[in-house]
Image (spheres, grey):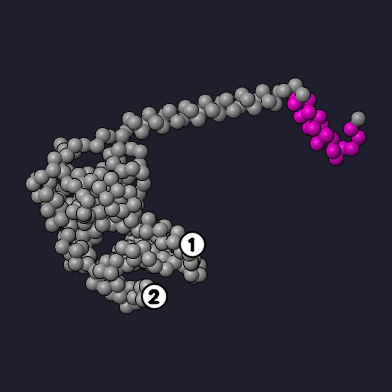
Amino acid sequence: MLTNPETFGTDTLILVLLRLLKNNTILKIMKKFLKIIAIIILGLTISIAGFLYFISKTLPVGQQGLKAEQLTDKIQEAINQKAWDTTAAVSFSFRGNHHYLWDKERNLVQVEWDSQKVLYNTQTLEGVAYENDKKLTDSEKADAIKKANDHFNNDSFWLIAPFKLRDAGTTRSIVMQDNQEALMITYASGGSTPGDSYVWLLDKNYMPKAWRMWVSIIPVGGLETTWEDWKILQNNLKIATSHKGLIDLKLENVKTGQSIEEINNGIDPFTEL
């Protein structure tokens, strides 16, 4: 007999659980529950796979040659490629939490995110790294530089991809998209994810208005993202600062200049390198 009223509820629950265990009732319930969960997961997996297959587009076959090069010329003229080529320094923020100072002439970048700051050479991947203003060493330093370089490769691409149409290792070809000529760029090398293809959709003035992506990190082929909110910077340089698609991306505080000091209050942050 249960005589202590304070333990009545607990004791009763224990007795009930013991009886259920004895009759294998809980095990049966758990098996049914797990079976239902497995069916739900399988159904979701099949549904997602079917959805991705349905919306994914096949990579178009392009035509390389003179017409592709002429279209590339028109895009570069529209965005002022020459102004970009002579720009020495750039600063920008990506999605509000990755902040960059980029000395193009010296191949040096400062990357700040969360509690970390990394300054390094993009050619040698040598540099310095800090976390909460504490200097990192050995493997922690190497890991921080690698992460900073991955951030930079991805984030800067959303800033300057239109200026990389003739990078080493690229091929250019004409494709038809929505009954209009578009320019497909395939990157055979470079960056963190080489082998990707991008199809540039253009307005009547040959300004990029969107691209469709066939990239290794996205399972959907032909995903479209806009290039808009074009800003006119120094020397009539044009840079898009907003991208809308599956995920919206914003680039802020974009500045360009002829030296890192010009865009960084007269300070060169790379003196310790």
Q: Is residue 8 visible?
A: yes
The residue to which callout 2 is attached is: 272
Specify whether 34 is left or right of 238.
right
Q: Which mark is residue 74?
A: none
| Residue 226 place in picture, x, y as percent | 27, 47
* C-alpha separation, residue under disc 1 versus residue under disc 2: 19 Å
Q: Amino acid at mark 1?
A: Glu
The residue to which callout 1 is attached is: 140
Q: Amino acid at mark 2?
A: Glu
| Residue 6 place in picture, x, y as percent | 85, 40
| Residue 144 place in picture, x, y as percent | 44, 61
Q: Is residue 242 above or below residue 115?
A: above
| Residue 60 place in picture, x, y as percent | 21, 37
| Magenta segment boundaries in residue numbering | 2-21
Question: Which residue is drawn at the image coordinates 79% and 32% (left, top)?
Answer: 14
- Element type where label 2 sits in the image: loop
Which quadrant is the C terminus positioned in? Answer: bottom left
Q: Is residue 210 visible?
A: no
Question: Which residue is drawn at the image coordinates 19% and 63% (left, top)?
Answer: 85
